[in-house]
Image (cartoon, rainbow, N blue to C red):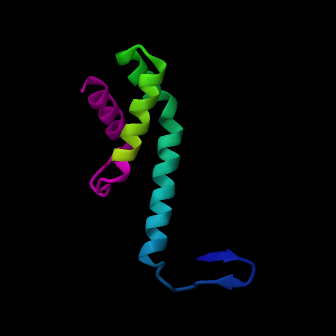
Amino acid sequence: FILSGSFSFHNQVPSVSFVKILFAMRLDQEFLNHKTYFFKLAYNLLGERQEAEDIIQEVWLKFLKIEHLEIKNIKNYLARMVVNQALD
């Protein structure tokens, strides 16, 4: 595991906090990759741009609070959350 230049962490296990940061970055990227799709879902159900944007924000904040280890497909999970929130 090399960060840069001559500084390296060979044969060392990354700390739990480092792993959590990497996982959070992956979640952020996954969300951003599909944000337009989630918006379209919400907009098609609600018909109003601002409400759709609010739903996307609410879903993201709720998603950050749950345990993610059991989720196999983040896109589908978030899409289901968007639909449920929009219909609520």
Above or below, 9 relative to 27? below
Question: Residue drawn 42% across and 31% down?
Answer: 54
Which quadrant would the C terminus be assigned to in this image?
A: top left
Above or below, 71 relative to 81? below
Query: Which residue is the extreme one toward the left?
Result: 88
Q: Is residue 41 left or right of residue 4?
A: left
Question: Residue drawn 53% across and 39% down?
Answer: 33
- For the stretch drawn in magenta, the main secondary structure is helix
User: Residue 1: x, y in percent?
Assistant: 58, 77
User: Residue 79: x, y in percent?
Assistant: 35, 33
Query: Which residue is the extreme one toward the top?
Result: 47
Q: Is residue 6 left or right of residue 23?
A: right
Residue 6 picture quarter: bottom right
User: Residue 36: x, y in percent?
Assistant: 51, 29
- Closer-to-camera residue (47/4): 47
Q: How many dots with numbers?
A: 0
Residue 86 picture quarter: top left
User: Residue 67: x, y in percent?
Assistant: 29, 56
Q: Is residue 17 left or right of residue 78?
A: right
Above or below, 51 relative to 34? above
- Closer-to-camera residue (45/27): 45
Report the span colored magenta.
63-88
Question: Residue drawn 52% across and 86% down?
Answer: 11
Above or below, 45 relative to 27? above
On whether residue 70 falls in the magenta region, the answer is yes
Question: Residue drawn 30% across and 50% down?
Answer: 71
Query: Which residue is the extreme one toward the right?
Result: 5
On whether residue 79 falls in the magenta region, the answer is yes
